[in-house]
Image (spheres, rainbow, N blue to C red):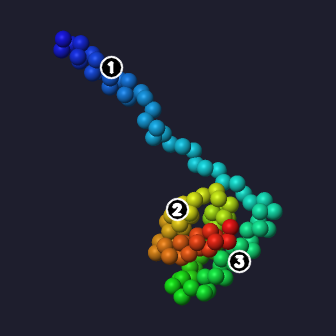
Amino acid sequence: MKQNLLIALIAGFTFTACTDTGMSLAPAPVYQAPTEAKMAKFKPVMTEVALSTRNDPKYNKMTIKPQDKQWFQDLMYRYWDRQITRRQFISEGISRYPGHNYEFTFIANGFQHRS
């Protein structure tokens, strides 16, 4: 009896170790680069959002490093184009520029109101 129980227990562990737990690593998402037509629609909205930051006294202007300017524009474009969520936009921004939660939230709100 004990031997049958031991065999069943070992078999159970064996099957458990071979099953997919759903926690496999998914490939990183591939983002679509902007077309000229989309970029023509995006740029005025981006400019409008950028100018709106001047009207908010709580907004602390972020000094974007030269090597991050393209990253920042791409991040805003991906959010505007709905390739990432609001939460992802803010999270990615704060991970690169900690302490600017208000600013990334403000920018996200700006795009939300203009899209």
* Quadrant position of the C terminus in the picture: bottom right
Q: Which residue is mark 2?
A: 87
Q: Which residue is mark 3?
A: 47
Identify the mark nearer the N-term, 2 or 1. Answer: 1
Residue 77: x percent and y percent?
67, 64
Could you say whether the residue bearing mark 1 is in a helix, strand or loop? helix
Q: Quadrant of residue 35?
A: bottom right
Q: Amino acid at mark 1?
A: Ala
Q: Which mark is residue 65?
A: none
Q: Residues within 10 Å of mark 2 (few under 14, many from 20)?
A: few
- Residue at 46% in and 75% down: 99
Gap in Å between the C-alphas at discs 2 and 3? 22 Å
Q: Residues within 10 Å of mark 3 (few under 14, many from 20)?
A: few
Q: Is residue 9 above or below residue 29?
A: above
Could you say whether the residue bearing mark 3 is in a helix, strand or loop? helix
Could you say whether the residue bearing mark 2 is in a helix, strand or loop? helix
Q: Is residue 71 visible?
A: no
Gap in Å between the C-alphas at discs 3 and 1? 63 Å
Asked whether disc 2 touches disc 3, contact meaning CB atoms under 8 Å apart, the reply is no
Outermost residue toward the front in this view: 113
Q: Amino acid at mark 2?
A: Arg
Identify the mark nearer the N-term, 3 or 1. Answer: 1
Q: Which residue is mark 1?
A: 11
Q: Residues within 10 Å of mark 1 (few under 14, many from 20)?
A: few
Q: Quadrant of residue 68?
A: bottom right
